[in-house]
Amino acid sequence: MILYSTKDRTHRATLEEAVFRGLPPDNGLYMPERIPELPAAFIEHLPEYSFQEIAETVSKALFGEVIPEDDIRHITGRALDFPAPVVSLDEDTHVLELWHGPSLAFKDFGARFMAALMSWFLKKRNQETVILVATSGDTGGAVAAGFYDTPGIHVVILYPSGKVSPLQEKQLTTLGKNIRALEIEGTFDDCQALVKQAFLDVSLRRHIALSSANSINIARLIPQSFYYFEAFKQLMPLKKPVAFVVPSGNFGNLTAGLFAKRMGLPVAHFVAATNVNDVVPEYLATGKFRPRPSIPTLSNAMDVGNPSNFQRMLDLYGSTWNNLRNEISGYAFDDAQTRQAIRAIHDQYGYLMDPHGAVGFLAWQAFRQTRPELQGIILETAHPAKFLETMESTLGRKIAIPERLARLARKEKKSTLLPPDYEQFKAWLEAHYKKD
Ligand SMILES: *Cc1c(COP(=O)(O)O)cnc(C)c1O
C-alpha cells in the first residue's frame, strides 16, 4: 500500500510511514494511491457477513500487501469489539448508532483501529513509542480509551486544567496502566505548544520515540468506512436506495463514506449536515471555499471553521465542484433548530438523539423532500448522555446515564499538575520514559 500527499502526488509514503508521521512534510494529507474495488459478490452477499468479517475483508483489500491475513483478523478483532446497530424511526428514516464503544462516540472506531495497527508495526520493530496528545476534551478520551492496554504504546495526555468538563476529565484521568494525564495550568493552546516543542526537540527524541494520534491520521479514517458497509447491510432487505446523512465537523466521517463508495458500496447520495459552521455546505452551494474562525454551538464537536479533510474530498473528486455536488448535498442549522429537533425526535419517535445527530436529522428532513425515492441513514455520532445538560434543558426532564458513564464518574482522578513550562514537561517525560 502506497500513499501520496494531497499537496504533491509525487511525495510517496508506505503505510507504516504514513501512520507514524500522521502528516506528510508538506502539510498535505495522506491518500491511498489505490482504493481497491471490492468484488460485486461481496456487496451482494453482505448480509451473510458479520461486522468483524466485513472489517476484515475491507482491511485485507487495503492492507493485504503489508499485513498478513491472520494479523489483520487480530487487529480488526481487537479494535472493533462493539457493534454498530441501525434502528429505524420511520419507514425511511434510520439511525446508525456509533456510540457503543468505550468513549461513547464514533471516534472510538478510528482510535482503536489506529492503536491496534501501530501496535502491530511496533511489535515487528521490537520498539516502544510514546504518544503525545493535547486535547481540549473529546479527542483525548477516545484516544486514551483506544490505546488503553495496547502493547508497546504509552500515552501522555495534556489537557488544560479546569477547562474540560468533569466527565471528560474522568475519561482522561482514570484509566491508568499505559495512560498518563498531565493537567496543564494553562490553555489548550499551551498544551498544544508543549507537544509541538517536544516533537521539535532532537535531544529528547534521541532517547524517547514520540508519535502523535492526530485525527487526520489515515489509520483513523479508514476504519470509519467499515460501518458504512455494516449499516448498508442491515437495510438491504428493504431494497431501497440509500443516502447517508453525516453530521460533520472536520469531515473525516463523511470522507470515510466516500471511500466506502469508491470501494464499491452502492450509496445513492451523501448529505453533509453541519451547525452554523457551514463552510462545506456553502462550498457545495456556491463553489467557494471560505474557511473562517469557528463559532461555538451546542453540537461542539462540529465547531470547525477550516475542515481539514476537505482536501481529501477535493482529491477524491479531481477538485471539481460539479463532481462533488453530484454526490453530496449540504445543509446547515442553528442551535434553536437543533433543540427543536431533539424535542421533535423525542416526542414523535420516543428516541433520544444527541445534538450532533439532531443536526443530521434536520438535514435528512430537508433532503428527503428532494429525493423521496431514497431511504436515509443518519449517523448518530455520540451517546446523548454525553451532552446531559443540553439534553435535559431541552427536554425538560432527566435522562438516564448509561452504567459505563456512571461508573466513570465514581472513579478516582489521577493526574499530574504542571505549569505550561517546556523544561518541566521535558524533565517529566525523561523521568518516566527514558530507557538508558
Ligand atoms: C468528531 C465528532 C463529529 C465530527 O466528525 P468529523 O469526522 O470531524 O466530521 C461529530 N459528532 C461527534 C459527536 C464528534 O465527536
Image (tube, helix red, strand yellow):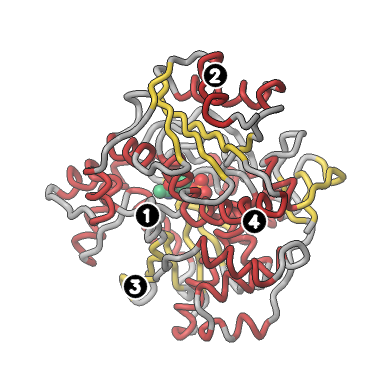
Q: Which residue is mark 4?
A: 120
With 200 as the anchor, is 363 left or right in this view?
A: left
Mark in the foreground, 4 or 2: 2
Q: Residues within 10 Å of mark 1 (few under 14, many from 20)?
A: many
Earlier sequence position, callout 1 versus callout 3: 3
Q: Which residue is mark 3?
A: 88
Q: Is residue 331 visible?
A: no
What SS does tag 4 mark? Answer: helix
With 70 as the anchor, is 252 left or right in this view?
A: left
Q: Nearer the viewer, residue 314 or 208?
A: 208
Q: Which residue is mark 1?
A: 357
Say if 150 sits above or below 308 in the image. Answer: below
Residue at 50% across, 13% down = 421
Residue at 50% across, 67% down = 243
Label 2 with label 3: CB-CB less than 8 Å: no
Mark in the foreground, 2 or 1: 2
Earlier sequence position, callout 4 versus callout 2: 4
What SS does tag 3 mark? Answer: strand
Rounded to the nearest angstrom, the CA distance separating label 1 from label 3 is 14 Å
With 291 as the anchor, is 168 left or right in this view?
A: left
**What's under tag 4, amino acid-wise?**
Trp
**What's under tag 3, amino acid-wise?**
Ser
Q: Nearer the viewer, residue 29 or 307?
A: 29
Q: Which residue is mark 2?
A: 427
Earlier sequence position, callout 2 versus callout 3: 3
Residue at 53% across, 81% down = 49
